[in-house]
Image (spheres, grey):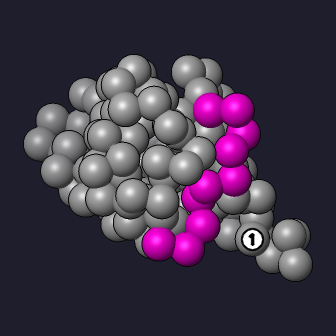
Amino acid sequence: MKDTNRLTYGRTSVYNLNYHIIWGTKYRNKVLKGHVEAVFKQLVYDIAKEYGFEIAHMEIDKDDHVHLLVSAPPKLSVTNIIRWLKGITAYQLFRQCPELQTSYWKQKGRHLWSPSYYVESIGAVNEQAVARYIDDQRKKEQ
């Protein structure tokens, strides 16, 4: 029998689409800590709410890359989700966090994120394992 708690019911579909997404800062600069981390996490939740997907788990590892477990409806492509997350957070972080100016000194043409990313689709069996892995990222540093 299927676990119906994992399923999301849309108007014309029933789905359980989850993605493990990882991306890092340009040059692996360790800037995702303190105030920048707090602002970043709030921005990610705001973006997810605005565009209609859910962040099930989120953690920053080694202050230079992000792990997310994202649940999204089938109408949203992973490419768009990542484009929104990376683009909007970079723009807003440069505006709201003046401490980033020391690591990213150019005023124009600066990039917070590396252009690449990793994405993996997660089935129902692996969802708890990936969630536990993401949640444990900060604990491994200590």
Quadrant location, the N terminus? bottom right
Question: Label 1 belongs to which residue?
Answer: 138
Q: Nearer the viewer, residue 43 or 13?
A: 43
Up the image or down, 112 lies above or below 101; here it is above
- Asked whether the viewer can see residue 23, the reply is no
Q: Residue at x 59, y 28 (%)?
A: 114
Residue 31 left/right relative to 12: right
User: 2 and 37: which one is in front?
Assistant: 37
Residue 72 position in % (x across, y down)? 36, 42
Which corner quadrant of the image does residue 11 belong to? top left
- Quarter of the picture containing the C terminus is bottom right
Question: Residue 27: percent from the left, percent from the top?
Answer: 70, 32
Give, as a single range, the part of the protein colored magenta.
Answer: 26-35
Q: Is residue 90 left or right of residue 139?
A: left
- Does residue 109 lie above or below 20 as drawn? above
Q: Amino acid at mark 1?
A: Arg
Report if residue 33 lies within the magenta region.
Answer: yes
Q: Secondary structure at mark 1?
A: helix
On whether residue 99 falls in the magenta region, the answer is no
Residue at 39% across, 21% down? 109
x then y, percent, for residue 117 = 61, 28
- In the displayed image of the protein, which residue is found farthest to the left? 11
Tag 1: Cα neighbours inside 10 Å, few (<14), some, or many (≥20)?
few
- Does any portion of residue 114 appear in the rendered image? yes
Q: Above or below — where is 58 with respect to 47?
A: below
Residue found at x 86% / y 70%: 141
